[in-house]
Image (spheres, rainbow, N blue to C red):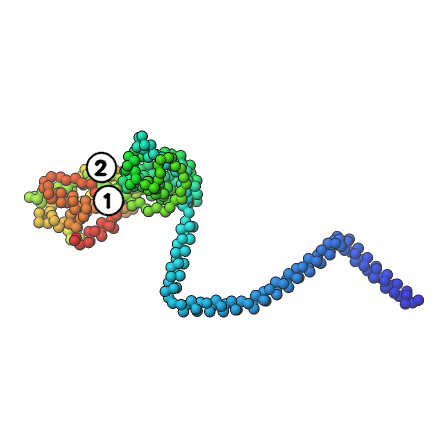
Amino acid sequence: MRQNLSQEATVFSHHIRHNIRNDFILTCLLVPMWAVGAIVVLVLVLVACFIFCVFKKCFGKKKKPKKVRERKAGRRRKEKEGEGETGEKEGEVKKEGEEEEKEQEKLGKLEFSLDYNFTDSQLIVGILQAQDLAAMDMGGTSDPYVKVFLLPDKKKKYETKVQRKNLCPVFNETFIFKIPYAELGGKTLVLQVFDFDRFSKHDMIGEIKIPMNSVDLGQPMQQWRDLESGEKEEEKLGDICISLRYVPTAGKLTVNIMEAKNLKKMDVGGLSDPYVKIVLQQNGKRIKKKKTTVKKNTLNPYFNESFSFDVPFEQIQKVQVVITVFDYDKLGSNDPIGKTFMGYGATGVGLRHWSDMLANPRRPVAQWHTLLPEEEVDAALKAKPR
């Protein structure tokens, strides 16, 4: 009897504890039993995943040294195969790298149209639009415009309007070249996209070259083409017109600085303040120097200023007349725009002009000279004539 009562008391106490626990969970934790079960299952799943990851990691560590040994052995075998094969593989890697660089260099694309009017012998070029142009300005944009011309003569160049701060500009402009169809096959149409800059040289974004003998002009065409990096145009420094006169009996050389045109822009405002320095020299030693007045704010100055030098007849074949065009700067140093020379050691136009002067004594002989970079002319002055 006592044992039965004891068992009943034990069962009753377990029942009470179970009810108290459930009441605590429901009232204090506010979590239903099904949620508790879900949490338990989730914990078990996480534990299983953890055990699996640890097992995999340990398993991987056992395999890794074998792979490392295989790689090292492979390297040793490749090194023993000879330098020739290695060189070929290095060359292939370099080529692949260059191809990847080319693929990465995206300059944008241009849509254009071509048509030919056989009645009026006119090539009609339409510049329609561009897309995804390379950003050339610091703000991550560009101010694009397009130059259109035919090679090899470059006699006629057209330009579209500038589209401000636009990497996908729409132009819709048409240009006409008057050219017989028979001559068109030997020409190449060039479309160059530039980034406009008010205060410095315009940067080329890219270009398209179209050999006209590869185009069927029997019907109008319109297409997109990717821009390619173009060769940089040679920087034009300008031209200067000089008159030379030599009187052998008096030993008098007269240099007249007449005018200059298309000088390079040197100032922030897009102009220059040019003047010309004339140096008479022999064997690299300066004999005499003179200079013109400064012409303010112009790229096409007119000077018409004459300078005389005493040069005996026996010395005239040994001297050089060096002409340098400078941009005057009131605050800083004067910057050279370009340079040319005539006389001993000269070639091309410089030699021809000097020879014409000697062949026509007492008569002024005028000639246009293209200005060259100062370093190029200085190197020619130091070189021994052939």
Crowding around mark 1 (Cα neighbors within 10 Å: few <14, some 14 to 19, many 20+) is many
Query: Depth check: 35 or 372 in front?
Result: 35
Query: Depth check: 47 or 280 in front?
Result: 47
Find disc 1 in the rendering and name its residue.
Answer: 371
User: Which residue is at the far right?
Assistant: 1
Q: Tell me which corner region of the image, top left, top right, bottom left or bottom right, holds residue 130.
A: top left
Residue in the image at 11% along x and 46% along y: 310
| Residue 250 in the image: above or below residue 92 | above
Helix, strand or loop at disc 1? loop
Q: Position of residue 187 (x, y in %)?
A: 30, 40
Tell me the quadrant of the picture where the N terminus can be found. Answer: bottom right
Mark 1 or mark 2, earlier in chain:
2
Q: Is residue 363 left or right of residue 90?
A: left
Helix, strand or loop at disc 2? strand
Q: Tell me which corner region of the image, top left, top right, bottom left or bottom right, holds residue 12.
A: bottom right
Find disc 2 in the rendering and name its residue.
Answer: 302
Q: Is residue 334 visible?
A: no
| Residue 87 in the image: above or below residue 208 | below
Q: Is residue 335 left or right of residue 14?
A: left
Q: Tell me which corner region of the image, top left, top right, bottom left or bottom right, holds residue 199.
A: top left
User: Which residue is at the far top?
Assistant: 119
Q: CA distance from mark 1 to mark 2?
A: 16 Å
Residue in the image at 60% along x and 64% along y: 56
Q: Position of residue 194 (x, y in %)?
A: 36, 42
Q: Amino acid at mark 1?
A: Leu
Q: Amino acid at mark 2?
A: Tyr
Residue in the image at 21% along x and 46% along y: 340
Say whether marks 1 and 2 touch (CB < 8 Å): no
